[in-house]
Amino acid sequence: MPFHKTFGVDLGTSMVKIYSCQQDTILTEKNMIAIRNGKQILAAGNDAYEIFEKNPSNVSVITPMTFGKIADINHTEMVLHSLLEKAGAGTVLGNTLYLAVPADLSEIEKRAYYTIGNSNRKNKIYMVDKTIADAVALGIPINKTKGSMVVNIGAQSCEISVIEKGRVVLSKIVEIGGKQLNESIQNMVRRRCNLNIGSRTARRLKFSLAYLKEDKKEARKVVGVDSLTGLPQEGIVSSRMVFEAILEPLGTICEEIRFFLERTPPQIRQNISREGINLTGGTTKIPDIEWFISRQTGQKVCLSRFYDLCTIYGLKEIIGSKSLRKWVK
């Protein structure tokens, strides 16, 4: 077995996806790290997530990325190193890493990605625009397209990009994603039910009760902490309540898409209207979100079947195809 191995890495705010070329497998784990007393590393990835919202006061469970970008270089490096080991990375001769990065990074931010990927000074680091990786997985003919829009709604951010003739011509990160929707649900339940629920519970409600197209009369029983007594308490959350909670942040995303289309050159915008908006990302698992965005923007919307794995599947194709390597930086 060769010591030098090749990996594709999608560092998301919520999840880290690692593709192993040698094993042809994809590892998906939480982008989290648990630290005791600010020094001792207890766990990373899914193991850290198991501690999340159950941790004692001397243990911090943090996500080292914010709004789709690196917020803490050291902790991001620790998470990546730990998960690469799980994925079977070798350390003797180093590894080749293909990192998916946002298209509109500054030079300093690009340097941060290079730093975390090359911590042992032996790795070969290549970068691929996330939009390009998404487009490859979506089957967009990157070289030939006269205008394609890709909208990736992730855990804390929404990246809106336009591709034309093999390049990303416009790109913007909107700081709204799944976490903000979870927080809106938590706030709504607190106001309506006097009940404090965790982000895990809010996330489950988001995917099970957020009906955007049909007004279904459904509800779920949840357990939280009573706002008045501070004691554990059960409550009932309706689908209507969840819908009202997420309506405003989703509406803001649609406004940003409309504004982005207005900034797009007319000839490119015409092709986008014919082709439709390509929608992907973990938050797009919300039922009928493509219908909602289509209605709000007046554009046809094509939902990816890969959801949050779209970028890593694109990296997999790029790594395996010499003809796609020209989009590697």
Image (cartoon, grey):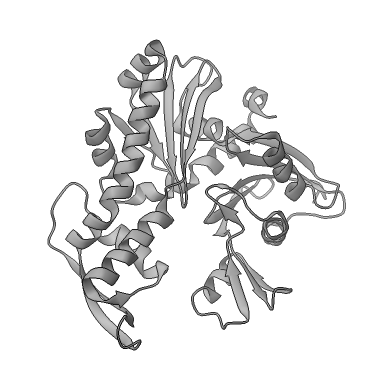
In the displayed structure, does residue 206 sit left or right of residue 56? Answer: left
- Identify the residue at image location x=64%, y=22%: 323
- Identify the residue at image location x=19%, y=68%: 219
In the displayed structure, does residue 172 sit left or right of residue 63? Answer: left
- Residue 272: % across, % down: 36, 21
- Residue 119: % across, % down: 80, 52
In the displayed structure, does residue 162 sit left or right of residue 286? Answer: right
Q: Residue furthest front?
A: 228
- Residue 208: % across, % down: 28, 61
* As drawn, 98 above or below 70: above
- Identify the residue at image location x=55%, y=34%: 133
- Identify the residue at image location x=23%, y=78%: 235
- Closer-to-camera residue (117/237): 237
* As drawn, 189 above or below 175: below
Q: Quadrant of the C terminus?
A: top right
- Residue 296: % across, % down: 24, 35
In the displayed structure, does residue 312 sit left or right of residue 326? Answer: left
Q: Residue furthest top?
A: 267
Q: Quadrant of residue 293?
A: top left
Number of numbered discs on residues: 0
Q: Quadrant of residue 7?
A: top right
